[in-house]
Image: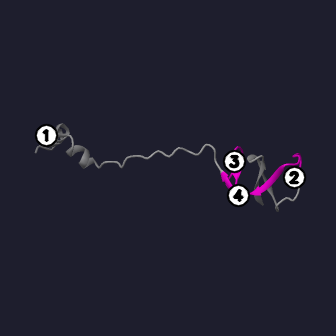
């Protein structure tokens, strides 16, 4: 089975599974709807020039590289002093 996006006026209005590409509008849909094969599409996406686009792409948040414990201790002299005292150095 393949997934097909049901598109009307450049917007995906439904996603349906078919054995093969339909040649007529899907049952329950009037003229002007087209079925386009796509495994990675959702309702509300846009379709133009042969490409589906998510109108609300997920936000990518870059996380800072975590510091090592050694780096955290060395950048804070008070913590380094506590560590030395605890180790008896």
* Residue that carries the numbered disc 4 in the rendered image: 50
Residue 88 located left or right of residue 64: left
Q: Residues within 10 Å of mark 2 (few under 14, many from 20)?
A: some
Q: Nearer the viewer, mark 4 or mark 2?
A: 4
Going from the N terminus, do you reach mark 2 or mark 1 first?
A: 2
Kindly report the distance in space between the C-alpha atoms of the residues bearing marks 1 and 4: 67 Å
Dominant secondary structure (helix, strand or loop) of the stretch shown in magenta: loop
Kindly report the distance in space between the C-alpha atoms of the residues bearing marks 4 and 3: 10 Å
Badge 1 element: helix
Residue 5 position in % (x across, y down): 75, 52
* Residue that carries the numbered disc 2 in the rendered image: 25
Q: Which residues are magenta?
A: 25-52
**2 and 3 marks in contact (CB < 8 Å):** no
Going from the N terminus, do you reach mark 4 or mark 2 first?
A: 2
Kindly report the distance in space between the C-alpha atoms of the residues bearing marks 2 and 3: 19 Å
Question: At 43% from the left edge and 47% from the top edge, which residue is drawn?
Answer: 62
* Residue that carries the numbered disc 3 in the rendered image: 46
Residue 17 position in % (x across, y down): 79, 55
Closer to the camera, 36 or 66? 36
* Residue that carries the numbered disc 1 in the rendered image: 85
Q: On the image, which quarter does residue 37 sit in?
A: bottom right
Q: Nearer the viewer, mark 3 or mark 1?
A: 3
Q: On the image, which quarter does residue 36 sit in?
A: bottom right
Kindly report the distance in space between the C-alpha atoms of the residues bearing marks 2 and 1: 78 Å
Badge 2 element: loop
Kindly report the distance in space between the C-alpha atoms of the residues bearing marks 3 and 1: 63 Å
Closer to the camera, 49 or 4? 49
């Amino acid at each position: 089975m393949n997934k097909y996006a049901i598109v009307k006026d450049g917007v995906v209005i439904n996603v349906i599974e078919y054995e093969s590409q339909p040649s007529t509008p899907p049952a329950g849909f009037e003229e002007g709807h087209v079925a386009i094969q796509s495994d990675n599409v959702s309702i509300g996406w846009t379709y133009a020039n042969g490409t589906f686009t998510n109108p609300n792409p997920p936000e990518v948040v870059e996380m800072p590289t975590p510091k090592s414990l050694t780096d955290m201790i060395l950048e804070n002299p008070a913590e380094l002093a506590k560590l030395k005292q605890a180790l008896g150095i």
